[in-house]
Image (spheres, rainbow, N blue to C red):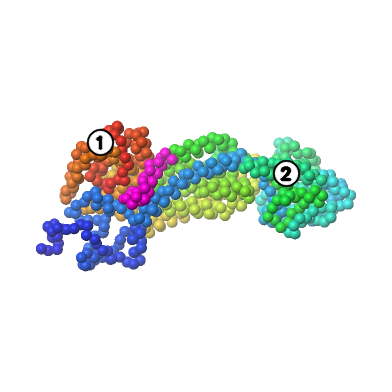
Amino acid sequence: MSRASLTTTAPRTFDAPTAYVVSVYSLVLVLLGCFRPRPHGSVNSNEFKSASKTILPATATRDVPFTSKSLDVKAQVSGFQIFVRIGSNLVAGSLLVLSLVTLFVLLTQGMFDRRIILTAPQSPDNFWGDYGQSCLLNAHGFVPGSCSTMEVATTTTAAWTSIGELLAEHWAASSTPWFVSTCTVGPPTTGWVFVVFLGSATTFPSCTPVAGEQPIDGIAKLETANRDEHPLGLYELAILGDAAMAETTEHSNTDGTIVKLLSGMRQFVIAPNGKWQVDALGVNTVITSQPLGCVFKMSTYYQSLFVDMTGASMGTDGWSAGRLSGKVPVVGTNAVSFVTNYGLLAVAQGLLGLLSLVLLSGDALMTFKGLEGVMLRKPVLTYDLLSGLEQRKLLLLLLTLNAAPALLYVEVARIYYGTPSGNQIWLLSLALLSNFVAFLTLLCVVTLQQLPVPSRRLVPFSTPTLLYGTAVAIMYGANLQYLSLSNAFYASAWNLPLIINGTERPAGAYDMTSVPTTATLLLPQLGYTVLFAFIASVLVAMARRFYCFITTSWTATNGFLQETRLPNLLTGLPLGREAAITIGNKSFCKPSTQAILGYATIVQAAPQKVCATTVAATEAATVTRKTDAPLALVMSTYLLVPVLFGWLPPRPLGAVVGNHFGSAEAVNTRKRFEYSRGFCVN
């Protein structure tokens, strides 16, 4: 009897092991299940066959019979892939939880209506710098001709004269001239700035002392401010003399911390013409931002003050202290920010989050069933949820909208650079922003897929690479710009500046135009990041498949895939020939592929008598099923949990009978259903 006739007349053992000869380069990747075998040949009964005669595990000749069990074996993946898929799904679910956690943290920290004291100890790290040590102050004001031209040019000449008179009066300067050092606090060359005056009866104080405590007899802070009756702006001067440092009061921040203030401070506004008056309002740096439109407008304003840091650790090499009082005054600001209609925003985000959880409940159940099966060492269904987001368009839209408030969160967070909880809030907000951009990018890709350009050749991309690459790159890059973004908030258009080294610098008198948002400032970086992440995702997908295009012609022979709407142009779905189980002229869709496409399988919970499925070795398979055979329905994962709990009747896409997909018959809504890990279907 010839060897060629063995397949038709001689008995054959189909489960006999076959050895494949592969390159050592691909050995580990094949064992881990990352790639299909690409053998040099096979060995069976000590006989070597060349690659052209080798039958890969996913194929067979037409006359080879198949069973559900044999298909199920072919659909299994390696343990490594199982853990990767389950882990990826758990991470994907945590991305949704992140938005709710961020909302909770921001609400508990009072970020939508926040008041917190910001301090600026005397250190170069806090942008302190020397500006002038020439001014002398007597009982009438600055000694004529003592201040340098650069110092006088900080304001108008008339305003500078009034500043000297107010310092002399409230520092109680004597007829013997005091020494006044002029300090700048702000970025070196551009951006916000304010001026600090340090007065001493003995010598010029240092703006950045390095030898511990230095005695002073007075301190003052100069900024600019807007008032309704002075649309062009005013100079704002806060003064604290040594004698007034004895008065203290406590201030409670929104985050619950307590700060001790030196309440003896006096505050004045000075017009450019030199006229001054007591400042009853004490507010400057009124800035607005509208990243989510005027409905959720964010507004901020500052109030100057001096903080009592006596005995506290400031992390600096030196500090100033009142000569007689012994108090350590530190320049501070009461930073106030609030968001209009923030309650409406919180409710909307909460509802979007809950609705997203409802739509994600089916995938959560399938993931935990897979995890349970792994623990019990049973066959399980696992799949990559992120790869299936393009088929879950409603869920993807909700995830994008749920992360959209991050545009506002990063706007609030950048104000509080350097505060105790500032970094925590910034990182949470930035993580949510990176998720928003990643989901929005995928949503744009999904929209592109809807273009009516039918083709059997699709450009592949890796959805996890696109999402994770975008999110990680944005979070890393934007975090490096935290300081510059914070400074940019105070670099908007102004009405009245301070002139430092001949350069006009904003100092609190900002106009009412909204500042550029964080997203606007990051837009070039976001665009490049998305572009590079998308290119990387395409290259990764091509490298994993070893070809440049996905050919989907085989889907025309699969009844299940004919009932689903497949994408155009490009896709991250496993729709290539390698994702199918091909037996003769039949192509079977794996349960994992069905799950990625957004479908789950349920069966009747009551035990039923099942008749065997018979498939003839002809072109058309004959399926025999008794009326009491268990009903297996394929339905959307959105409805899986409601159907299993009996809240909704099944609305199946179709039914599975003997691994063949067909239309579903009328479903008895009184029957209970249970989850199934599915079947390979044709």
The amino acid type, in three-letter code, at marker 1 is Glu
Tell me the number on the disc at residue 479.
none
Residue closest to the eye, 480 or 447: 480
Residue closest to the eye, 203 or 160: 203
Q: Residue furthest front?
A: 376
Give the percent coordinates (x, y) of residue 406: 53, 44
Give the residue at x 34% y 43%: 599
Give the residue at x 75% y 43%: 248
The amino acid type, in three-letter code, at marker 2 is Leu
Q: From where the camera sits, is residue 630 visible? A: yes
- What residue is disc 1 on? 665
Q: Residue furthest right?
A: 175
Q: Using residue 635 as the reference point, say whether residue 125 is left or right of it.
A: right
- What residue is disc 2 on? 261
Give the percent coordinates (x, y) of residue 12: 17, 58
Sort mark 1 into few (<14), some (14-19) or many (20+) by Cα contacts within 10 Å: few
The N terminus lies in quadrant: bottom left
- Circle 1 sits in a helix, a strand or a loop, which is it? loop
- Circle 2 sits in a helix, a strand or a loop, which is it? strand
Give the percent coordinates (x, y) of residue 316: 70, 56
Q: Using residue 449 as the reference point, say whether residue 319 is left or right of it.
A: right
Give the residue at x 61% y 52%: 483
Q: Using residue 575 as the reference point, say whether residue 497 is left or right of it.
A: right
Sort mark 2 into few (<14), some (14-19) or many (20+) by Cα contacts within 10 Å: many
Mark 1 touches mark 2? (CB < 8 Å): no
Q: Earlier in the sequence, mark 1 or mark 2?
A: 2
Q: CA distance from mark 1 to mark 2?
A: 77 Å
Does the magenta run of residues contain 163?
no
Q: Which residues are magenta?
A: 357-381
